[in-house]
Image (cartoon, rainbow, N blue to C red):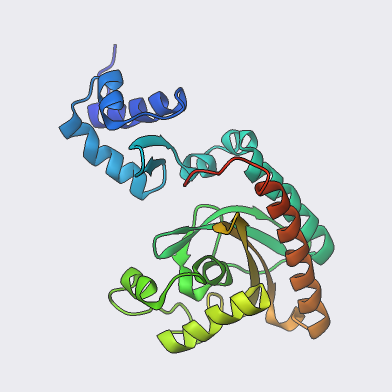
Amino acid sequence: MKTLHKPTERVLLILETLANADGMTLSELSLKTDISKGTIFPILKSLQYRKYISHDDRNGIYTLGISCAVLASSTVEKEFWLKMINSEMHTVVNECNEVCQLGILDDAWVLYVDKVQGEQTVQLVSKVGTRLPAICSALGKALLHKHRDEEILELYPQGLPSVTARSVTDMAQLRQQLVQVADNGYAMDDREINDDTICFAVPLQQKGIILAAISVSLPSFRATDEKTQQVIRSLKDAKDRIESVLNKLPDIKNY
């Protein structure tokens, strides 16, 4: 038998072990995989950082994370709430005929988890699996709007990043935008992540906890008042339907 790469084997063994369990502690994983705690712990930290696994600080339990779903469409199909959101994203696209995306917060980044394309094309820098600075995107602002200024600044110790010339790099100005998210019920970026694209997003919450956000992006030349109001209305309606289901489910664990 061909010799396998041991470090890679350890990573795969950890993921396969968690896939066949409801969750395991560090000690249980070490025992089950026959990998010492000293060896397995840094692997777990790396997998957690990339969201391939999730760690519950309250009970020390490790479970599979959202990045596994991003890589495997079959896993997404098995995740009821992601499938339900995807169905609502298709409804949004049918109503607006523009691209709809799903994202989650990954520290200082938005991780794009799902995307439904409309018939009308739009040039985007994002795709499923892409990570972009959260403060520059409507998705990120929807996800971050409950964060305090200090929490946001801690995410960006080198200063607020910019992607385009219109990206907001001043905390006071960003705070105004985040307040508007709470007041208006939606976030917006005006060519802050793409030079020619405007985006609107709404946060998706379960019992007040923000889990994810969905957005609609469209080129600025199509962003008439009538079109933007249609997009906002469609997103808000989808948000209401999604949250009505999420609030009936058991608490969804961190990704």
Direction top: furthest residue: 1
Name the image quarter holding residue 121: bottom right
Q: Give the percent coordinates (x, y) of residue 213.
A: 60, 60
Q: Is residue 150 left or right of 187 when viewed as pictured?
A: left
Q: Position of residue 91 (x, y in %)?
A: 80, 55
- Residue at 82 percent of width and 58 percent of height: 94
Q: Position of residue 227 (x, y in %)?
A: 80, 77
Q: Nearer the viewer, residue 120 or 191?
A: 191
Question: In the rendered view, does 167 fall on the left or right side of 12?
Answer: right
Q: Is residue 186 above or below residue 110?
A: below
Q: Is residue 72 left or right of residue 23?
A: right
23 lies above or below 133: above
Q: Position of residue 12 (x, y in %)?
A: 36, 29
Q: Is residue 118 visible?
A: no
**Does the image show residue 243?**
yes
Residue at image point 74% right, 81% down:
223
In the picture, measured across the screen, residue 76 lies left or right of residue 39, that is right
Q: What count of labels does the image hold? A: 0
Q: Residue at x 29, y 11 (%)?
A: 1
